[in-house]
Amino acid sequence: MELDDLYRRVIMDHYKNPRNRGTLDEESVTVNLNNPTCGDRISLQLQLEGGIVKEAKFTGEGCSISMSSASMMTEAVKGKTTEEALELAERFSTFIKGEPAEFDELEDIEALSGVSKFPARIKCATLSWNALRKGIEHQNQQ
């Protein structure tokens, strides 16, 4: 099996069986973002306690890239400090634009490496990560 086929399977697995899809009952920070170019929409909920991402869930609609990226992101940031989560979001942002990076937090993220070849899809992949940044920044301002 070629690497591209493996990556495609990982992306489709996260799309068809999204991790952390749903809503939080506990008090949480909610960020709603959309990508008007392609119609992707996400509602990200973060439970932030003592500078730690205790829980992350999302709902929304979109292409396989945006939804699988949201699934991967929520898995990768749970249990991280908000600083670690922001650093991870920054690393993802440069990675998705074609810069090499490794993700020990969740190797599945590397399956999105091919997105950098399609500039129109970068916004799809970064939508949930931008919601993460906004949620943490909102919490930090309070």
Image (cartoon, rainbow, N blue to C red):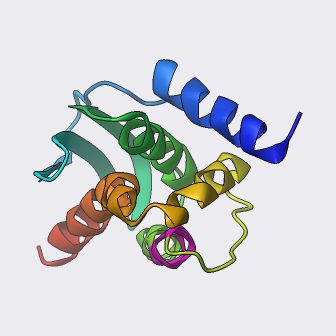
Does the rendering let one see residue 18? Answer: no
> Where does the N terminus fall, quadrant-wise?
top right
Tell me the residue at 67%/46% (across/down). Answer: 108
Does the rendering let one see residue 127? Answer: yes
> Which is the main secondary structure of the residues drawn in magenta?
helix
Residue 34's x, y, as percent? 14, 49
Circle count: 0
Tell me the residue at 25%/58% (across/down). Answer: 131
Tell me the residue at 64%/36% (across/down). Answer: 8
Q: Left or right of 38: which side holds 128?
A: right
Q: Left or right of 122: which side holds 99?
A: right
Q: Left or right of 44: which side holds 11?
A: right
Front residue of this view, candidates 132 and 25: 132
Tell me the residue at 58%/36% (across/down). Answer: 11
Residue 40's x, y, as percent? 21, 41
Front residue of this view, candidates 52 and 38: 38
Q: Is residue 36 above or below residue 65?
A: below
Is 41 inside the magenta-drawn segment?
no
Q: Which residues are magenta?
A: 90-96
Is 95 inside the magenta-drawn segment?
yes
Q: Is residue 48 above or below residue 94?
A: above
> Where does the C terminus fall, quadrant-wise?
bottom left
Name the residue at the right extreme: 1
Residue 99's x, y, as percent? 61, 80
Front residue of this view, candidates 100 and 119: 119
